[in-house]
Image (spheres, coloured by chain):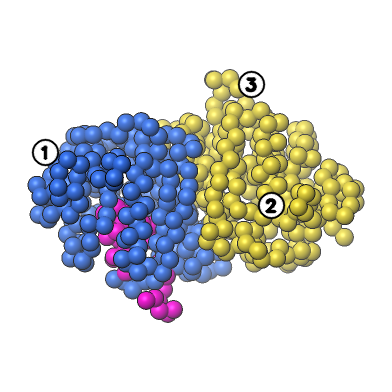
Chain colours: A yellow, B blue
Amino acid sequence: MPSPSRPSAVVLLSGGLDSTTVLRLASREGFALHALTFSYGQRHLAEVEAARKIARAEEVVHHYVVDIDLGLFGGSALTTRTEIPKDRDLGQDGARGTIPITYVPARNTIFLSYATALAEVTGAADIFIGVNALDYSGYPDCRPEYIAAFERMANLATRAGVEGMTKVKIRAPLIDMSKAQIIELGLSLGVDYSLTTSCYDPAPGGEACGRCDACQLRRKGFAEAGAEDPISYAGRTADRVGGPT
Amino acid sequence: MPSPSRPSAVVLLSGGLDSTTVLRLASREGFALHALTFSYGQRHLAEVEAARKIARAEEVVHHYVVDIDLGLFGGSALTTRTEIPKDRDLGQDGARGTIPITYVPARNTIFLSYATALAEVTGAADIFIGVNALDYSGYPDCRPEYIAAFERMANLATRAGVEGMTKVKIRAPLIDMSKAQIIELGLSLGVDYSLTTSCYDPAPGGEACGRCDACQLRRKGFAEAGAEDPISYAGRTADRVGGPT
């Protein structure tokens, strides 16, 4: 249970593999955890359910689930009826350099803005986000220079900037890690990846498709880490093979 | 009516005096206007109704009203049941240096984040916001250095940062103006201030209280501009006197 003397941290928790690993890292650092999840009109609402289970398992102080309608503006395959790309080549030349249609405009900026508000209200100086520049799948708002610019802005936006209070730190501990490294780290910390979900286009029952970019990156990560992915994919049982075929 | 060749701009429109003036400025520059208003659990929902009327009068291309629950986190008198301060001394030493309890944590950051998403989707390179550093009532996220930091972050967050597209500009044309100067400018552009509302704590019928910080700044502005405030205040008719008593 949280002790009142522990410092607070806000952790963005999507229900995916990366943010769940980050939640455990923040927990190990001794923070009182305020988890923040968005229900943003994404097609993969199974994420939000996964986040609830993960937050409970991690004994967070509070889990905020915020309803926001990013679909209102359109602009992403994740929030509209556009077909999710499957079986893309995510190799060296495949995924880099172009922004996929699953990119949601300004998503991390909106998420971090809410996190900044919550940090101010809870007195947290640390905001954790599970972005990752190596396996980032081409999203501009997963790059280190973006995170640094957000932190600078946030410290001008809030009481911290006026009253000389503790500065907010945007902490992205996975930013330079490969998916395999993240999985190895999480397993060493005892993260239960069976609670997580990564799929952009799960079956109605929540089962991962195994073929979208997110599933492919996850399966490749487990394969490279030499570990077994504990979730099951549509049409098969737990992914003993590892990488996509 | 909008012509397809006009560039688009996103304008944050609260329904208040400042943002209504900014909307007219953007209109005069020839932009196709995408107005963006937030219903954020504020006590003064009359703002949202005012914004709808103003957007119609200005013939915007689209008026987005986004529901967001800033009250979820608490932390401001504008979104909770805390009493709104009245009859505060807003003189030189009164309002500066401290942040009033009407400050909503990270509000402008959340608003500008949504505006950034909308700009990306509509292809707008210009985002207009009616912040104002002189009469800003002590809010940290109304300062020029904050606006500059947001712009820099936004250009790293979006496609613009990766693909070398047009950069987003955060335009705050009122930032160095006094309330009286804003009113003079707006009147010279034919802005109909009778459509606007500024009060933090209006009566159930929407009538302004005349005594909160926002009403005081507005009334002082009209008085200094030597103009008549066309709205009525609780307990009186249109404010012919000008400044607060």
Are the numbered discs 1 and 3 placed on the same chain, yes or no? no
Asked if A36 appears above or below B6 in the picture, the reply is above
Mark 3 crowdedness (10 Å alpha carbons): few <14, some 14-19, many ≥20? few
Q: Can residue B101 be seen in this view?
A: yes
Question: Quick one: which residue is furthest to the front in this view?
Answer: B205
Quadrant of image for the N terminus of chain B: bottom left
Q: Is mark 3 on a helix, strand or loop?
A: loop
Q: What element carries label 2?
A: loop
Judged left or right of residue A44, residue B243 is: left
For the residues carrying marks 1 and 3, which lies nearer the camera in this image?
A: 1
Residue at 55% in and 43% down: A66
Amino acid on which disc 3 is placed: Met
Are the numbered discs 2 and 3 placed on the same chain, yes or no? yes
Q: What subunit carries mark 1?
A: B
Q: Earlier in the sequence, mark 2 or mark 3?
A: 3
Query: Mark 2 = which residue?
Result: A44
Query: Mark 3 = which residue?
Result: A1
Q: How far apart are marks 2 and 1 (CA)?
A: 57 Å
